[in-house]
Amino acid sequence: MEKKQLKPITNGLLWIFAIGQFGWSLLSGVVSNWMVYYYTGSPDAQNPNTGIFAGFITQEPILFKLTLFGMVLAAGRIFDAITDPLIAGWSDRSNYKGGRRIPFMRVMAIPFALCTIALFVLPQTGNQGLNDFALFVLLMVFYLFMTMFCTPYNALIAELGDTQQHRINVSTYISFTFIVGQSISFLLPNVAGALQGSFGQAGSIRMAVAIMSTIACLAMLFPAFYIKERDYIESKPSQTRPFTSLIKTFSNGQFRRFVYSDVIYFFALTLFQTGLPFYETKLMQVPDTMTFTLTATMTAISVCLYPVVNILAKKIGKKALIITGFFAYSVVFAITSICGVGIHWGFIVAVTAAIPMAILGILPQACVADVAEVTRLETGEDRSGMFFAARTFAFKMGQAIALVAFTSITVAKTQASYRTTAIVAFVTCFIGAVLFFAYNEKKLLNRINELKGNE
């Protein structure tokens, strides 16, 4: 039987693919950036909506200094991490008419968006115990839907990145759309403020979440229906069972070296991102409506640096830049821990964070794609889904620990407690930078060139 001629992968196609990243990034940003703020914070004269939903759920520590909310968030991330390899194995082994990845994206986009809305609506009955239970169930479902969309989506990074040039390009494009999605999520208080006259204080927040979720859903559906997976990718179902595939993935020495640093980095970054609205409103004492301005500044500078990162990665390699990014983020966390009152501190953090955000937003995905490509060439089996799932399995464990740590450290809701989270982020990120020296990028790229020369 004659082999099907695949269509060439173009940068235009990669940009269309990247729109999906904007969608799920926006949903993720709404939940990760604002759930803690609205469900646990305390209001003040300048930011009266902080903690607006806090009365609906249990706030007191239930075990040592561990709060129920923090434990629920951590449980969601752990559940998410556990389901990653299961969904990745399902995707790798599937043989649907539309491909191994796209069918998942088409089915999950709408439920994923609806569950995001429900998180800000349903856990608000008159029964606190019922609200706690509803929040727990909704978070589990939210993370399950996110995994079922994102794991197959991430596998396409390696499969559409058929060359080193395309792997760096697609990583650059999805980094751009990711950061735009995250930045727009910081507009939530602004959108809610514009709607408050029509929907009231709480209703305006729910409506703002609904508007953003609708936009995100459309963004996720666009590449899912535009890209015909089998026109560009020769999809061969993997024969390896999910957890066998996961064990094989972690048995790869270079992948493990990458993951060690990645887990620590995401622990530090999650502490920082969860705390960002509090750093700005409680330490710098700026209105929460200014968070978008600061984030937009950081995003704009970071995006301007994307071409530089893209070019430097091809000239000096990804490893040196990633280590630079780790150390730069450590500086950002250190500055945050000593910041004072005033919007100028927000701009200092925003400008400083733009550099590591550009580097670490682009290059780690390309590193995973490199490892997956070597394995494909050596074994003849494409397990791209599992490599990206194994990475997310690991870093989500770091995120889970960070969420417990943040809500436990800040249970007193004092300035000192918020500064402590930034100090912890500084120390751990510095350790991550040191560990990444063990990753051998040159060996991987030489092996890819050697194996492709033998094809």
Image (cartoon, rainbow, N blue to C red):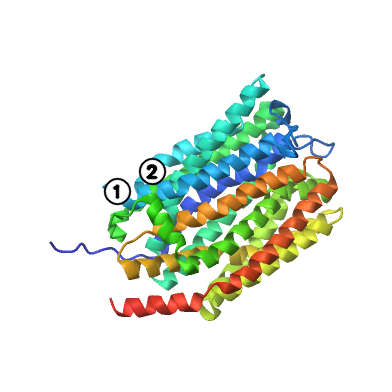
Element type at marker 2?
Answer: helix
Mark 1: amino acid: Gly
Q: Pick whichever, 129 or 14, lies toward us.
A: 129
Whether residue 323 sits left or right of residue 310 in the image: it is right
Query: Quick check: can you spot residue 285?
Result: no
Answer with the quarter of the image where residue 331 lies.
bottom right
Q: Is residue 98 above or below residue 349?
A: above
Q: Is residue 354 above or below residue 385?
A: below
Total numbered labels placed on residues in the image: 2
Residue 115: which disc? none
Q: Pick whichever, 2 or 195, lies toward us.
A: 2
Q: Quadrant of the N terminus?
A: bottom left
Residue found at x 43% / y 55%: 246
Mark 2: amino acid: Arg
* Image location (x, y in percent) of residue 179: 59, 56
Residue found at x 44% / y 72%: 165
Q: Which residue is mark 2?
A: 106
Residue 98: which disc? 1
**Badge 1 vs badge 2, beta-carbon distance below 8 Å:** yes
